[in-house]
Amino acid sequence: MHLNLHRHMPDDPTAQARCPAIILHGLFGQARNWQALAKRLAVDRPVLVPDLRNHGRSPHDAAMDYATMAGDIAHLIERTVPDLASAPDHQPPDRRPPGRAAVIGHSMGGKVAAALALTRPDLVARLMVLDIAPVTYGGRGFEVYIDAMRALPLDRIASRQEADAHLARAIPDRPIRAFLMLNLSLATGGARWRPDLDAIRAALPAIYGFPELSTLGGQPYEGPTLFLSGDRSDYVQSEHRDTIRTLFPAARLASLKEAGHWLHADQPEAFLRAARQFLAADETTASLAP
């Protein structure tokens, strides 16, 4: 699947040649939510931010397990980050072997990034997982959110205020409603949800879970890995550490102070410092395909 992709390129030629970073958003996120942070990270290196399948402006599809979503990102890297250093000069860009990228993923996107590293370590230079562990979680309320979103009378919605009033009956948390409504389009032609709500609702058991390594057909990822969580979030627990270190032997675990699950939004400056420090340890070169 060809994902909708936002590219952020540095002006400095030296920075343009550094290993690119790919940022993967979480459930009901989208690439444009990361635009401000991606632009700031792109001072140092190319930054690519796709809409994951069934999100944003990417295509819809019933399949939404982690192996499939990791495959989407593998395809993106293979067609976008050719390894020019190992290819003959005469070989056209689309025929060159793939390069590698540093992959950053938040929440569901963190699980996609983890699955990619476990199955295609040749494509992942470094791995940064934000406030999620490669484990199965219990329900987090998304069933309620999706059912409320599906019940919204789109043909009668003319403003975000009207949509908010309807959603408030089932979703009392205003910040959650505001986040979900970032996915509501009110363009000419009527209101519509950009995500495929039916596909996501059906895939929730897979999204809450994480496949066994044997199911993925992968192996532990030995590359540099950082699991960064918010100290006010309960997503990464002490009992998850053994699983993390079994799958990612080189993993470091750290947290941001006064940050919740959306740690990059709660503490953007601290997140940027942590991300830049982690990414700067790998300054191998790559070149983006046109």
Image: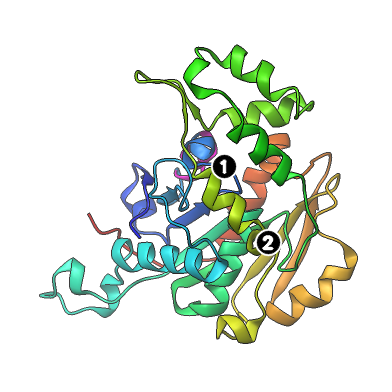
Residue 285 image offset from top left, x and y in percent: 37, 65
Q: CA distance from mark 1 to mark 2?
A: 18 Å
User: For the residue marked with disc 1, what is the amino acid?
Assistant: Gly
Please name the residue shown 67% across and 45% down the image: 271
Q: Secondary structure at mark 1?
A: loop
Residue at label 2?
Answer: 205
Where, by quadrant of the figure, is residue 77 drawn? bottom left
Answer left or right for 76 relative to 174.
left
Mark on residue 197?
A: none
Q: Is residue 153 above or below residue 93?
A: above
Residue 169 image offset from top left, x and y in percent: 75, 23
Q: Which residues are magenta?
A: 36-42
Please name the residue shown 35% across and 60% down the image: 1
Residue 274 at least partly seen: yes
Instruction: Give the mark nearest the N terminus, 1 or 2.
Output: 1
Colour option used: rainbow
Q: Compare residues 170 and 76 and report the one nearer the observer.
A: 170
Residue 249 at least partly seen: no
Answer left or right for 196 relative to 220.
left
Q: Compare residues 270 and 12 and report the one nearer the observer.
A: 270
Residue 138 image offset from top left, x and y in percent: 80, 58
Residue at the farthest right position: 238
User: For the residue marked with disc 2, what is the amino acid?
Assistant: Pro
Q: Compare residues 97 and 68 and report the one nearer the observer.
A: 68
Residue at label 1?
Answer: 29
Q: Is residue 8 above or below residue 246?
A: above
